[in-house]
Amino acid sequence: MAWVYLLIAGILEVVWAIGMKYSEGWTKLYPSIFTIVSMAIGFYFLSLAVKSLPLGTSYAVWTGIGTVGTVIFSLIFFKEPMDWVKLVCILLIVTGIVGLRLFHKQ
């Protein structure tokens, strides 16, 4: 169940990163509230995951999910540029996340 909690926490990291963009430096009330609530819930799920998973693994996977998800969202919805270097770097992050999951020993 800890890996499910970690996945939820990672997805919520994407949500709050996007929320920060829409809050426009915390000047828009509703996006700011949405962002803060997403952060709190995401941290809660991360705290559940680290109860039974190693902290280093949890943190690496959490930030990796957040990074990859935010980049993908930004490419699609904010039309950020993509080049082969960015693609290779994202694939390296995904490889790291998958590797940490596959080779995790309990």
Image (spheres, rainbow, N blue to C red):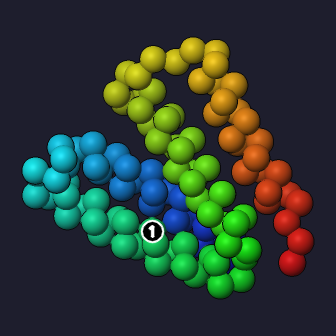
Q: Quadrant of the C terminus?
A: bottom right
- At numbered mark 1, what does the secondary structure look like: helix, strand or loop? helix
Q: Residue at x 57, y 54 (%)?
A: 63
Q: Which residue is mark 1?
A: 42
**Residue ID at (27%, 43%):** 21
Residue depicted at x 28% and y 49%? 20
| Above or below: residue 93 compared with residue 35 | above
Task: Give the total of numbered labels.
Answer: 1
| Up-down relation of residue 22 to residue 44 (above or below) | above
The quarter holding residue 3 reads: bottom right
Q: Amino acid at mark 1?
A: Gly
Q: Pick whichever, 27 or 7, lies toward us.
A: 27
Give the camera-side residue of 10 and 24: 24
Residue 25 image point, x, y percent: 18, 47
Location of the N terminus (image quadrant): bottom right
> Is 94 displayed left or right of 22 in the figure?
right
